[in-house]
Amino acid sequence: MGMVGIISWFRQPFRLLDSHRARWQLVIFCGVFGCAFLNVFHPFNMNEWFHSVDTPLFAILTFFCAAGMAALALTQFVIRSLFRVELTTRIGFFAWLLVEFFFISVAVHTVNIILLQLSFFNLHEYLDTLKYTLMVLVLPYFLAILLLFVQKQLVTVEELTIKVNRSQSSESVTINDENGKIVVRMPVGNILYFKSEDNYIFLYYKSDHEVKKELIRNNLKKLEQDLNLPNFIRIHRSYMINTQNLVSILRTSQGYRVKMDATPDQVLVVSATYQRAFEDRVVQPGV
């Protein structure tokens, strides 16, 4: 991946932390994971740090995690609201991540100086705290983001499948060639999709539990105008699908991928040119 590709990747949309539910999942996962990790493994010889403190080590480590959770919740719910921070791109997310790590390290540092009765402005102590905070927090934070991503993909596929399957039609449609001559007449529900090939179109359709195709001399633009039915929608310069037979939609970082009934191994791409129209007509609002 070249520099242009890297810049393009950072400019991709990022919407995983839009909802309050997703933010709470992030806060709780990081807190619980961090608490379990610290108390089970005692990394960085933490069990040697607090000999002079009468408080049990379990309570100390749990207190550290609670402070980190509080700081994370503060950044996600209070500071983002006050400053109207919208994490809409990946570069924005990573920039905000630095801000969050700073606030969390300050919270943990505050707990540390209270327990050990150190000076708050001890830079060396703070830098050590920052280092250890990052080492403990990075893994659960990005695991939480990964889980949110997987969860959103699964929800997206499920919701979109339900929506497009609600619209059914049993009417028949006539398909003509470029001269207006009737080539095919069949129920709308049998048609899967059309694929453009130079000056021809391949019609893919279901017949007797098989997928068949018919070659038609025409172009997609003219065919789209002739059919003019809500079931048919262009998704690409070379493809027009019948949403009645659309069984799954997957949103990826590169856009949408769709699968049609009777052709589960065939994945069709929604190109950028047609993505907005596809979202308006097919994609479930709010996913």
Image: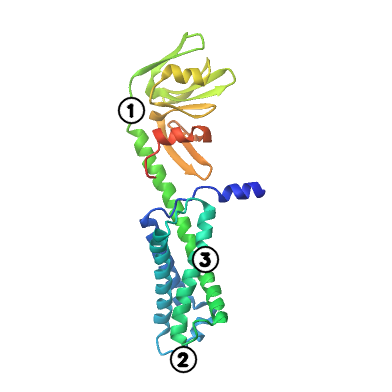
Q: Secondary structure at mark 3?
A: helix
Q: Nearer the viewer, residue 87 or 238?
A: 87
Q: Position of residue 203 (x, y in %)?
A: 49, 21
The three-letter amino acid code for the residue at tag 2 is: Ser
Instruction: Say if 61 sits above or below 220 in the image.
Output: below
Of labels 3 and 1, earlier in sequence is: 3
Dot 1 lies on which element?
A: loop
Mark 1 crowd level (few <14, some 14–19, many ≥20, 10 Å Cα):
few
Which badge, 2 or 1, comes first in the chain's sequence?
2
- Residue pictured at 40% horizontal, 66% vertical: 74
Crowd rating for badge 2 (residues with CA inside 10 Å; few <14, some 14–19, many 20+) = few
Judging depth in this view, the residue of 48 and 99 nearest the camera is 99
Distance between the alpha carbons at the discs numbered 3 and 2:
29 Å
Q: For this rendering, which residue is in front, 230 or 190?
A: 230
Q: What percent of the width, then of the height, locates residue 274? A: 49, 32
Amino acid type indicated by mark 1: Gln
Residue at 50% across, 62% down = 97
Determine which quarter of the picture holds residue 173.
top left
Instruction: Please identify the quarter of the rendering in which residue 225 is found.
Output: top left
Asked whether, in this view, residue 27 is left or right of residue 121, the answer is left
**Mark 2 — residue?**
52
Task: Say which residue label 1 marks.
Answer: 168
Q: Position of residue 176 (x, y in %)?
A: 46, 12
Q: Quadrant of the C terminus?
A: top left
